Amino acid sequence: MTLAREGRSVAETEPINVSEIVERCWRTVETGQATLHTDINRTVVGDRSRVQQLFENLIRNSIDHGGDSVTITVGEIENGFLRRR
């Protein structure tokens, strides 16, 4: 939410390996008994600190709303959309 509220423009971007930054974020967040599964070999271009903050927020939200033993999966999906049933 902080990212949405700051309203600052992004001045510097760089290539970011998604798997590496997700795993780095995982180590900085209290994860309890949650597990992480990464299955992605993709690089994105962005502001590293904002991308890191984005993934930290997603991890925290997943644990807060999914429970301490949730499994979080980061990967590519067909057509760029996720469908949960």
Image (tube, rainbow, N blue to C red):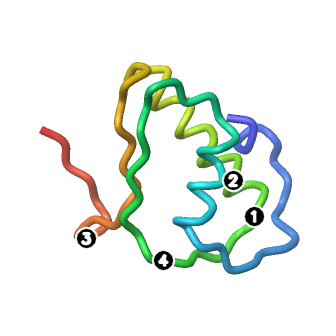
Which is nearer the eye, 27 or 3?
27
Which amino acid type is shown beneath numbered disc 2? Gln
**Tag 3 secondary structure:** helix
Q: Determine the CA span between mark 2 and mark 1.
A: 6 Å
Mark 3 in CB contact with mark 4 (< 8 angstroms): no
Q: Earlier in the sequence, mark 4 or mark 1?
A: 4
On the picture, is 35 further left or further right than 28?
Answer: left
**Residue to which mark 2 is pinned:** 52
Spot the residue most to the left.
85
Q: Nearer the viewer, mark 3 or mark 4?
A: 4
Q: What label sits on residue 79 in the rendered view? A: 3
Provide the secondary structure element on which disc 1 rests: helix
What percent of the width, then of the height, locates residue 74?
Answer: 40, 55
Q: Residue sitting at 59 percent across and 48 percent down?
A: 55
**Disc nearer the start of the sequence (4/2):** 4
The circle on residue 78 is none
Gap in angstroms between the C-alphas marked 1 and 3: 25 Å
- Graded by Cα atoms within 10 Å as few (under 14), some (14 to 19) or many (20 or more), the crowding at tag 4 reads few
Residue linked to disc 1: 48
**Proximity of marks 3 and 2: CB atoms separated by less than 8 Å:** no
Badge 2 element: helix
Quadrant location, the C terminus: top left
Image position, residue 16 (x, y; %): 65, 73
**Residue located at (59% from left, 73% from top):** 17
Residue with the mark numbered 4: 42
